[in-house]
Image (cartoon, rainbow, N blue to C red):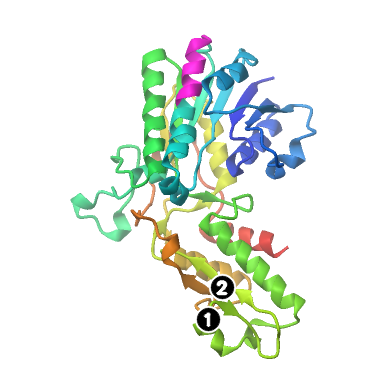
Amino acid sequence: MKTAIIFGITGQDGSHLADLLLEKNYKVTGVTRRTSTDNTTRISHILNNKNFRLASGDITDASSVLNILREHEQVDEVYNLAAQSHVAVSFKQPGLTWDITGKGCLNILQGLVDLNMLGARFYQASSSEMFGKNYDVELGMTTESKYQNEETKFLPQSPYAIAKCAAHYMTALYRDGYGIHASAGILFNHEGPRRGETFVTRKITKWIGDFVKWMNSLNISYADLSSACEEGDSLFASGVQYSFPKLRLGNLDAYRDWGYAGDYCEAMWMMLQQDEADDYVICTGETHTIREFLDVAFKEAGITDWSSCVIQDPEFYRPAEVDYLRGDCSKANTKLGWTPKHSFEDLVKMMVKHDLE
């Protein structure tokens, strides 16, 4: 039976990856930082699985990481999915972002070296945010032909992206310098019902779910809302005492390459099954604006015009915006045999359906 450690087990990706590995008959240890509140909601369904163990550890503390690794000296695979992954938060807490997202990766890699665990295979979760504004614009490409692949230069536009770049380069360094089978997946935006509610995609679908439930509780429909709603901060109907706050978002014109998190976690596992370690872009190859996401999401809830529901709030704009992300996963297609199984519309409808329940 193979064994694996997942740092960042309680996040969206950690829970999906744990599901996958357990299905493949792995023995899995998930590492989470001890907190005063329960943060195991996404993995509650596997807590009693005989092949799963939850361990307490802090990726920012090298000694804590060493203790975890020392308990698993014969481990086959180590996955680092731990991060402070909110780009906007990284501008407000750059030091914390660096400690978790950048230094945390170094602590694991150096721990593998210090304990002579060079036979363990290592996966680092890199991010498309590392590309930043670099989409080969200097080549005069049209919007339709812009893309980022493994050869595209990084031009990070946030503390989060800079920390991810450092971890990415550190992974390559320890691969070349120590011979560790260390691979990095440069994952483009990947979402799903397990996505945190403060991320823009889940923020949208969660708001839609709550809004529809609010209307149902008052026995009103979208057509009953007052035309005066267009000017205010809330939605309300004539003769109804209660109102519902509008959805506040930032830049609606940013392009993103969105895929389903479960598909992308399969790619992570596939990377560590290869004879040679390497880095791979994981994406769908399509790009859509947040406006397009809103179109599909609201339509799934039976609302064709969402303009009265959304407020663009400067608070949610980034200090440095990344306008366009679209990946080219030809290498993953060819070498891993990986392709995404869910389309953009599949993803959005899946998320809305979940939040309507």
Q: Nearer the viewer, residue 188 or 142?
A: 188
The residue that disc 1 covers is 232
What is the quadrant of the N terminus in the image? top right
Q: Nearer the viewer, residue 254 or 159?
A: 159
Which residue is the site of mark 2? 246
Q: Secondary structure at mark 1?
A: loop
SS assignment at label 2: loop
* Main secondary structure along the magenta-highlighted residues: helix
Q: Amino acid at mark 2?
A: Lys
Q: Are marks 2 and 1 in contact (CB under 8 Å)?
A: yes
**What is the count of numbered marks?**
2
Q: Quadrant of residue 173?
A: top left
The first of marks 2 and 1 along the sequence is 1
Identify the magenta region: 106-116
Q: Quadrant of residue 32?
A: top right
Percent of width and height locating residue 144: 32, 59
Q: Residues within 10 Å of mark 1 (few under 14, many from 20)?
A: few
Single out the residue that lies furthest toward the top.
116
* Rendered position, 278 above or below 188: above
Dot 2, how many residues are within 10 Å of its Cα: few (below 14), some (14-19), or many (20+)?
Answer: some
Q: Amino acid at mark 1?
A: Gly
Question: Is 244 on the left or on the right of 281, as rendered?
Answer: right
Residue 302 % position (x, y)? 62, 76
Residue 107 is one of the magenta-drawn residues: yes
Q: Is residue 339 left or right of residue 38?
A: left
Residue 329 appears in the picture as rendered: no
Q: Nearer the viewer, residue 190 or 336?
A: 190
Residue 312 shown left or right of residue 70 in the figure: left
